[in-house]
Amino acid sequence: MTEDVTTHTEPDRAEPTKRGRLREALRRLRPDLDVGKAPDPRFTLANERTFLAWARTGLALIGGGLVAAQVLRFGLGGAHLLVAIPAILLGGLIAIAGYVQWEVNERAMRLGQPLTYSPLVRLLAVGIAVLAVISIVLVVISAAVR
Amino acid sequence: MSPQAPKAHGWDEGAASERTLLAWERTAIASLAVAALVVRAGIVYSLLGLAIPIAAVLVLASVGEWLFSLRIYGEREQVGETGAVAHERVHAVLVGITLIAAAGSAALSIIR
């Protein structure tokens, strides 16, 4: 048996420019929502409002952390940062997770699949509980030291 | 006199778009509030060189959010016919701005 060997010459391709590579990288980052069919517009808009509510929650935590850094005084050096920095980090984390959940929900709606429960609710509840515990501990230690 | 019976609509004639417009405007107000807190922190800690660029990004974001809310409301008739548009790029930009605010706020709190 003889093998049919054919030689192909690759067409000359121009090197992608810096801008082209950046555009390609951004395209890859973009969520693939061109699946299924467009859901009822009310659902898409409700999903958007939920994302915005999480974004505002993130902004509120960032603002709260900033205020905590300026206002709280425990008399324990930089102890106020134990409240401020976790609140700010939680705010940033919630903003990212809110976006991921929005994308997951949008895809599910387009594919006619059931929506998944959001892990954000648990993240927020645990985060606020941890902040509360840290605050209580700092207040008690601060009172004991004085 | 009996009230006029509501007309039957397949689409709720912009109420969902109006609620979304209001949600964007609330987000714009939240961005402005965080910008004010960042400027206050900059004044208190004498770190205006760091605070002002972060606050400027947040103020520009709030203007963008307000303008975008008007665009969403403007899309309401088209939305009823073709389905709502998923604004993934705008959402990603909003997350990016929130992360800038978080990084700036953390830096202001630590550097003070």
Image (tube, coloured by chain):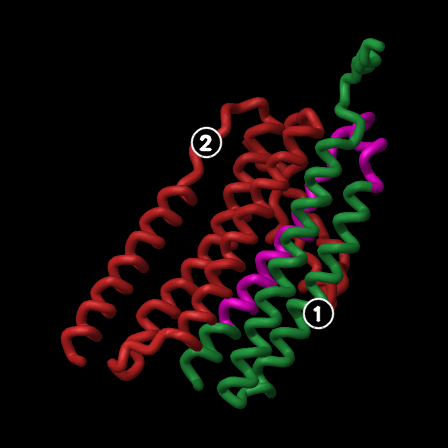
Residue A78 pos. (x, y %): 31, 80
Q: Quadrant of residue A45?
A: top right
**How many numbered marks have been drawn onto this rendered protein structure?**
2
Residue corresponding to mark 2 = A116
Chain B display color: green
Residue A81 pos. (x, y %): 35, 74
Q: Residue at x 52, y 48 (%)?
A: A54
SS at badge 1: helix
Q: Quadrant of residue A24?
A: bottom right
Task: Answer yes or no: are tags 1 and 2 on the same subunit.
Answer: yes
Residue A99 or B50: which is nearer the viewer?
B50
Q: Earlier in the sequence, mark 1 or mark 2?
A: 1
Q: Label 1: chain?
A: A
Q: Label 2: chain?
A: A
Residue B39 placement, left or right of B4: left
Q: Quadrant of the N terminus of chain A?
A: top right
Residue B5 pos. (x, y %): 81, 11
Residue corresponding to mark 1 = A18
Label 1 – label 2 distance at C-alpha? 39 Å
Magenta stretch prevailing secondary structure: helix
Chain A display color: red
Q: Quadrant of residue A103?
A: top right
Q: Residue at x 58, y 37 (%)?
A: A3
Q: Of all residues shown, which one is farthest toward the left?
A: A144
Q: Callout 1 environment at 10 Å: few (<14), some (14 to 19), or many (20+)? A: few
Q: Nearer the viewer, mark 1 or mark 2?
A: 2
SS at badge 2: loop
Residue B97 pos. (x, y %): 60, 63
Q: Is residue A89 magenta?
A: no
Q: Quadrant of the C terminus of chain A?
A: bottom left
Q: Which contiguous range is marked in magenta?
A: B74-103
